[in-house]
Amino acid sequence: MLPTGPTGKPIKTTDLHVGEAEPGCKKRDPILVVDGVRRTFGGLTAVDVDHVEVPRGAITALIGPNGAGKTTLFNLLTGFDKPDAGKWTFDGRPIAGVPAYRVARFGQIRTFQLTKALGLLTVMDNMLLGAKGQSGENLFRALLPFLWRKQETDNQAKALDLLTRFKLDTKKNDYAASLSGGQRKLLEMARALMSDPTLVMLDEPMAGVNPALTQSLLDHILNLKAQGMTVLFVEHDMHMVRHIADWVIVMAEGKVVAEGDPHEVMKNPAVIDAYLGSHHDEDIGEDPAAEVEHVSAITELLDDER
């Protein structure tokens, strides 16, 4: 079954791009456009992306073996790191060099592989931190409660609604530190929605999640698209990628080596080489167990396609 867009109509990959599905191909309506982004650490080139575009209103998966540069690219695009060279635009606005907090205000929100919930604050307080434009944050207005009381009440109602949707409403008064790893993932995603983002970037949303919560997270990611948001996520679970992604971008050794439909990309020789090629044996900082998992997943998917 084809993935569906916000209107409920199926999304075809041919609706997302122009010309051949190849690295750096043009998208019909890109929300994020990246040009010439390069980041090195000493003698190691972590990211070297000539051109890539993320289609609006779709779920795009960013995949690749360990050490491919996926998270580094995320950090660059969201203002948590600075590139050696390159530029990019979000919704037509140049944001290279823009601090992370301003990028978030523009509507580009990210989550982290290791959750950033503030453990010594309650779940509700964590949610309220995600709301934009809070009048009470101004020193003068903070002294005049009548200027911000209604806004705070509205934010609390919105936070409770989101917590209910994510089945965390019964935890609203608990400290975030008391949540399980999967619940923290849910909290981080719910908190991101407090700012009404246009683009949600998820860094390995399934990492460390109890299998019982996996389907819940999948449903929430699909709901983001149903609500009109664009999703870009890093993931190693190839079955999940094939299940929910409309488009896949594959990185290896810092470069984009393939793009396209999830089912077709898995057959691409460049992708097979990226996961199975011997040159990855020398990558710095790799997790051998995780790499074995990636190889098993890609070969299993290839067997399924046959």
Image (cartoon, rainbow, N blue to C red):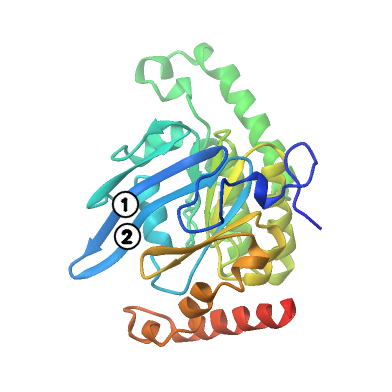
User: Can the viewer see residue 141 in this picture?
Assistant: yes
Across and down, in percent, residue 126 comes to 53, 43
- Residue 48 is marked as 2
Q: Residue at x 53, y 32 (%)?
A: 131
Residue at 37% in and 84% down: 279
Q: Is residue 171 visible?
A: no
Residue matched to label 1: 37
Counting from the top left corner in percent of width and height, residue 33 is at: 43, 42
Q: What percent of the width, then of the height, locates residue 23? A: 47, 58
Residue 1 position within the rendered picture, expressed as x and y whole percent measured from the top left: 81, 58
* Horizontal side, residue 142 vs residue 189: left or right: left
Kindly check if marks 2 and 1 are in contact, taking CB atoms under 8 A apart as contact: yes
Mark 1 belongs to which amino acid? Val
Q: Nearer the viewer, residue 264 or 293?
A: 264
Q: Quadrant of residue 106?
A: top left
Nearer to me, 305 or 179: 305
Q: Quick one: 256 or 162, which is closer to the camera?
A: 256
Check disc 1 and report its element: helix, strand or loop: strand
Picture quadrant where residue 287 is located? bottom left
SS for dot 2: strand
User: The C terminus lies in which quarter of the figure?
Assistant: bottom right
Please give left or right for residue 251 compared with residue 2 in the image: left
Of the image marks 2 and 1, the number of the one nearer the N terminus: 1
Q: Residue furthest front?
A: 19
Q: Is residue 254 left or right of residue 23?
A: left
